[in-house]
Amino acid sequence: EPEVTQTPSHQVTQMGQEVILRCVPISNHLYFYWYRQILGQKVEFLVSFYNNEISEKSEIFDDQFSVERPDGSNFTLKIRSTKLEDSAMYFCASGGSQREFLDTQYFGPGTRLTVL
Amino acid sequence: QQQVKQSPQSLIVQKGGISIINCAYENTAFDYFPWYQQFPGKGPALLIAIRPDVSEKKEGRFTISFNKSAKQFSLHIMDSQPGDSATYFCAGGTGNQFYFGTGTSLTVIP
């Protein structure tokens, strides 16, 4: 069964450093998402991406964040200058191989980001 | 503001019992309400979902009840099993943006 994959599983970085989190969505999906989950808290929407551009973004997704689909398979989240409060689990999700299935999102296993 | 409110925060149920988790939403524009199951160290996995044009949806032991006028929906897990022990999140939104509830930690005691 196809699945969303994410690398690395755990990233440790120093405050102020740039990090890139990588995701390989399910191959025929058209919509891509990033969410984050601070330990023990709810899942929070960051951004959605369709047709090589951002569709929606939350207030969390400020100028420090950017997303890119550099090729036909990868989808990346970049945090330019990490802060302590960026420490969280970051989930990639994909969905929407056909219009009528737009809303079904499949989540990857997550990348745990620890900012020291 | 919290777009989707979820309760209870934690739930303990005996094996074979019924687990009930409740959610309420604010935005009447929401048109899709999924429930996700999350095991420790894993990403959320879609369990079951409903659109507001139906009042109930059942898949195996899992049932969503939806009350559009009250802006509430709930997940019922029948014949709860120890393997159902996980965190459950409700969510609501439209095609591109979803808001998650705060999660319910379910423990099913053998």
Image (cartoon, coloured by chain):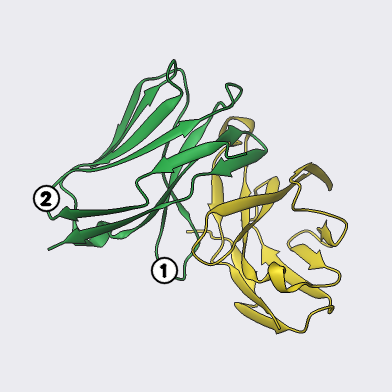
Chain colours: A yellow, B green
Tell me if mark 2 has few (under 14), some (14-19) or many (20+) residues whose alpha carbon lies within 10 angstroms of its own.
some
Whole-percent x, y for residue B70 in the image: 42, 19
- Which disc number belongs to residue A33? none
- Which disc number belongs to residue B16? 2
Tell me if mark 1 has few (under 14), some (14-19) or many (20+) residues whose alpha carbon lies within 10 angstroms of its own.
few
Chain that bears disc 1: B
Return the residue at label 1: B40
Q: Identify the residue at horizontal 48%, vertical 56% (top origin).
A: B44
Is A28 left or right of A76, judged from the image as shown? left
Q: Say if residue B51 shows up in the picture.
A: yes
Depth check, front residue: A74 or B30: B30
What is the secondary structure assignment of the residue under circle 2?
Answer: loop
Q: Identify the residue at horizontal 12%, vertical 63% (top origin).
A: B110
**Depicted B78 relative to depicted B41: above or below:** above
Whole-percent x, y for residue A63 in the image: 88, 57
**Depicted B64 relative to depicted A65: above or below:** above
Q: Identify the residue at horizontal 85%, vertical 62% (top origin).
A: A64
Of all residues, the one furthest to the front in this rendering is B1
Depth check, front residue: B96 or B85: B85
Is A73 left or right of B47, judged from the image as shown? right
Depth check, front residue: A66 or B101: B101
Q: Identify the residue at horizontal 84%, vertical 78% (top origin).
A: A16
